[in-house]
Amino acid sequence: MSAVAVSFLERPRDLRRRRAIGARLARVLVELSGLALLLGLWALGGWLIARNPSTAAFAGFAPAPALSRLYDMLRDGSALAAAVPSLGRIAFGLLIAFAAGAPVGVIVGSSALFRRATHLPFQLLRMVSPLAWMPIAILAFSTWNAAIVFLIFASSVWPIIFSTAHGLRKLDPDWFRLAHNLGAGRWQILRAVIVPAVAQDVLTGLRLALGVAWIVLVPAEYLGVTSGLGYAINDARDTLEYDRLAATVVLIGLIGFLLDALLLAAIARVSWTTHD
């Protein structure tokens, strides 16, 4: 084949590559524009607060002092010291919620009788705010840390249960009949059919659970603990360090964003469909 023919064949491929790069760049620019808008609104709010004599004491909420303080917190290790206890509580609470919620979700999704029997109580309990359990958690557990883990569990177990049940109910019954005809036992069906089929729904439920638990975490850490991101916000408020308070809020957002991104990547790996 001549060099001219090779060049002619490569042109459409190069054009598609350039278009893909252009589309990816446009997507990044759109996302950055949203972030720039958020920063602009934050800066405007900080400027209005600083100009008003009655709110000038809260000027530390502005982007410049807050981001400067966040940099100092990252450099001196105080950000990590505040984040590690919170991450430990979140991990422990989600682990318990997953260990309890996933098997219950499998039963709800596979048994019509169990689903009908638990529909009303599950829906009633699901609609109770997790923070409403706070007085009961304080009475039921001997340590503040255990009470916080319980509140995280109470907030995150329901998305896991219902997402797992939803994923199981979507399965085609013919899959189970085919597996039985091929001689698969219960554990083989669970490992080879059920787990791969519902993995995306389970991880989606876990992602929803993380979002709810991460929101509940901060007010839950206003309890008697002396560590964690919620405690750091409370302490900054009491000491009138509003730049540290704003920096901790940004830190909470960044950590939550990274955790969500990790679960989103895990969902994409097990997904049977492509996402933009």
Image (tube, grey):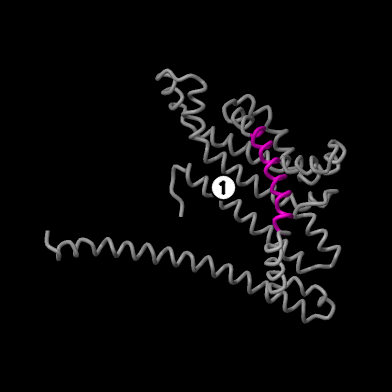
On the image, the x and y values in percent for residue 223 come to 84, 49
Per the rendered image, the range of residues in magenta is: 79-101
On the image, the x and y values in percent for residue 97 come to 68, 37
Task: Count the numbered circles shown.
Answer: 1
Nearest the eye: 123 or 275? 275
Q: Residue at x 72, y 40 (%)?
A: 153
Q: Residue at x 29, y 65 (%)?
A: 15
On the image, the x and y values in percent for residue 86 come to 72, 49
Looking at the picture, does residue 207 appear above or below residue 70?
above
On the image, the x and y values in percent for residue 270 come to 48, 42
Looking at the picture, does residue 109 appear above or below residue 202?
above
Q: Residue at x 73, y 54 (%)?
A: 81
Q: Is residue 21 left or right of residue 187?
A: left
Mark 1 — residue?
Answer: 263
Looking at the picture, does residue 43 appear above or below residue 210?
below
Q: Amino acid at mark 1?
A: Leu
Q: Is residue 11 left or right of residue 119?
A: left
Does the magenta stretch mainly form a helix, a strand or a loop? helix
Looking at the picture, does residue 199 appear above or below residue 51?
above
Task: Specify whether residue 93 is painted magenta.
Answer: yes
Q: Residues within 10 Å of mark 1 (few under 14, many from 20)?
A: some
Residue 177 placement: quadrant: top left
- Could you tell me which secondary element the residue under label 1 belongs to? helix
Nearest the eye: 216 or 251? 251
Q: Residue at x 66, y 59 (%)?
A: 253
Quarter of the image with the N terminus in it: bottom left
